Image (tube, rainbow, N blue to C red):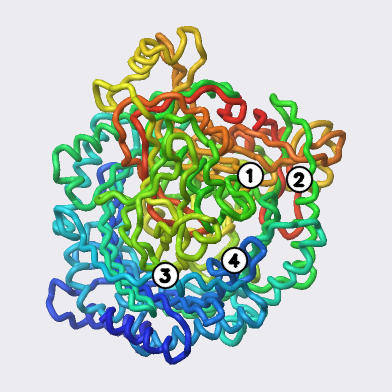
Amino acid sequence: MDLVAHLERVLRQYQTNPPAEELRLTGWRFSLNDLTNVKVGIRDNKLAEVYAAPTVNANYTGDLLLVWAGDRCSHAVLNAAIITALEDNLPEWERAAFHDTAGSVILSPQPMPLVAVEHHAAREIVKNSARPLFELLAQYQREMPHWGVSSLQAGAQASWGLRHIRTSQGLAVTYGQTTFSTYVAADGLFSKSFVKRRPPTVAEIAELIETTGKMTQLLKNQAELHPGQLPIIFAPSVVEELISKYLVGNLSGNNVVNNLSAYDLADFRQCKQVFAPTIAVVINPLDSYELSSYLCTREGVPARAQYLVEAGKLLTPYLTVKDSIKAEMRPTPLPQGSGMRLETGTAANLADLISDMDEGILVTSVLGLHTQDSSSGNYSLAAPQSLKIENGKLKGRVKAVIGGNFLQHLADPCTRYAGSKGENAPAMQVAAHVVKG
Amino acid sequence: MPQQILQAALAEAEKEGVYLIGRHQALRETAVVINNGSVERIVTEQSAGLGVQVFTPEGYSGFAANDNPNQAKAREQVQQAARLADLAQAYGGEQNRAIFKAAPLKAEFPPVRKYAFAYLPVADLTQLVIQVNKHLRELFPSVAVQTVYREIEEVWQIVRSDGTAVAFTVPRAVLSHSLTARAAGKSVTTRSAVAGTDVGLLLNADDLTEGNARAELMAGLAVAMLDAPAVKGGSFKLVIDYALAKGLAHEAFGHAVETDGVRTSVLGHNGKLAIGMQVAHPQVSIIDGPLEGDWAYQPISANGIKRETVTIVDKGILAAGLGDVFSAAQAGVSNSGAGRAESFAHIPLPRMSNIRIEVACPIPLAKPWHQVTPKELYTLLLERNLIQPDEEVYYLLGYKGGQVNTQYGDFVFNCSAIYRLGEEPVLYQPGIFAGKTLSALQAIKAGLGNIQCDAIGTCGKWGQAVPSSGGSHAFLVLEANPDIKLGGE
């Protein structure tokens, strides 16, 4: 059965000729991913061991909005079983409907941009052979011991599928999309990953291996930490996590309109200055082969670059159609994966920050970020894999417990940033409270 | 229908010459989200899927999952998994033949609950959730309240090529609140949750009272913490509530004894769990096992083996691990049926269920834990000579999750608020609790109150989210230890 065609046909039937009048739909919208994923891993040096066995997983995931008379809405999670038994479920969904005027709006179709989100090499892995995944892991097994790594964890996965968006307003979009991700974790000290919509190049794999190897070697040396108020540098991967935790939460339109954010609607209407004037926050789903890229949101909002913060001033939260109506603003693209980016206008790189520092630490990873209160901006984190910086040089590993406020760091004109090639976020130098871990 | 699908998979596995573990999962869920008295969303979900894990005679493994199972697709999945196992062999993958020695089991566990799934029409259910939300809004008008009620039913059927056929149903329900206070440009969010098996959480007066009491405590803290300063960082004597004690047991200890990680665990020695090692004061024991009606209840492992209750630490001595069929023997411990999977689409891993810390001769409490004020706690600790009047002691309450690196034994967990105990307790912002596995349990000095093990969470080991739970006495007292740090200024 063609599940998408079946779903569309039944919904149109319930819109035009329902079996009972109370089941007449006034509108509908669905987004459905038909995805197949192939992966394999290394655990404790062992390729394809029982917990990391080669896996193929085929599934349908998506969501459905139904609008009934009187602006009553139902939401359902879509999967193959639900679609197959669609007509059995519709009466139950009608009974579960609730009044939601803002939530019942279905957008008219709009022109879509062209975005490269499907890569032939990733698709071939899924459709034909998982051998390239094994080859990549075999390369890690061969090369990581040269860096003195004795305990290796790694993984590689590729996915391919079709994304379908349909609405009662006539939007009908189907496009192919792929993902490829891989990571290496060495001796429990350092890990690095690659996540895009295409496989890595030879140079990108070499860089992944070399960075992991070098950082692991550095972290095997011990150094002495002098606690107190210290300059610390968050590595780009840590800044990416901090953005996901603090900015994605506080710039969510749903959180803003429901007073669950650090900012309220008035802050956006007044373009309140919340960060330093050099800071911008942008969602850009148009970059080729980035995991964060797409053609349109599940509601049919076309992808476009959208600034949420410019020159340190709040412009708009990211908004679904429903939240945009409540906020009386335009709906926006939504962040996906690491799709919320920080622009800092810096020309410096990480080596500059390190070489300029007399004494401080480079935080390469943190424990406990998911436990923090994003609305306050406060963080209190363990950073057991940090590197001491002394006289502009990376020394050995120190264990630190760090505390500060990420939102205040972004507002602080003394905070320094450094661009990093191939990373989704800049490195960031701040002053924080540091306790010996 | 699931039986026929599983039988088709078994027959295909026999034809392919591979051993099969087949898992069929059917899931139903209703979620109601209320924001500040209004319905934000009501979502219903129903799904089913089949996961097949095959083993070649040499012990190479492959896995295939599909969310639209039927007999033909089941056969195709077995073939896909077998080809992947062949690929693992071609690339010199790891062999594991332990499943061939597992004893077959036939068992069925029907759900134990008072109210069936979807007992109430969704409209009635929604009104009850709105009432709970509005009650909090009335008590704390300055606090934004998001209330989420989720009711879940999972039906698992597991078969193996050795004739094993087991089935169990897990009913779960949770009522949670996100509570955000804002004033003068500052924001603080706290959370609270109660869990059970069904809509009794909203219908039973006792359950409602308990849920409201926890939410009111956390809403009050959100408001109070708007002006609270940051705590001083360092090593101190600490008092933690039972939910944080669950975090301590789970992060500091439980993950380090899961047998899939023993090869690199800080509690491993030459690939074996260091059974017999003194890891805690002799008055401390740690137990893990399924409790009927619990948020993390699972009577049978995802590999079709009965889940045992295990005394991991017995009077301070490491006595057992959390083992599954694939790695228990390698780790030198018994297979306790600890394999759990997020869904049919995931490969099971050894996981905790309900983990609790028990301390011998606990000090009795005269009232429920959430009614004990920081000042009353201080007075009681003084009376029992567990602290001195001028001692710097911090009381941490409200578990917010944790994380561990089992290879180095570094763990963290976080709280919602901190009080410095004294005649006039002082409230501080939360700070991370960071420690070392081998020091944390040694620091436990005393327990106060009865065992309470309904602290819930979601464990995300290796990217798989499964329900976790546990607890301890209402409060635990931990001696200051240089390896245990409170994050702060």
Q: Nearer the viewer, mark 3 or mark 1?
A: 3
Q: Are tags 1 and 2 found on a single chain?
A: no
- Examine the rendering and report whether any part of residue A60 can be seen: yes
Query: Which residue does the numbered mark 2 point to in the structure image?
Result: A219
Q: CA distance from mark 4 to mark 1?
A: 32 Å
Q: Tell me, for residue A430, which label it has, or none.
A: none
Dot 2 surroundings within 10 Å: few (below 14), some, or many (20 or more)?
Answer: many
Local SS, label 3: loop
Q: Is residue A327 above or below residue B236?
A: below
Corner quadrant of residue B202? top left
Disc 4: host chain: A
Q: CA distance from mark 2 to mark 3?
A: 42 Å
Query: Which residue does the numbered mark 3 point to in the structure image?
Result: B102
Instruction: Specify the amino acid type for callout 2.
Output: Leu
Corner quadrant of residue B65? bottom left
Q: Is residue B329 above or below residue B197?
A: below
Instruction: Specify the amino acid type for callout 3.
Output: Ala
Residue at 72% in and 29% down: A230
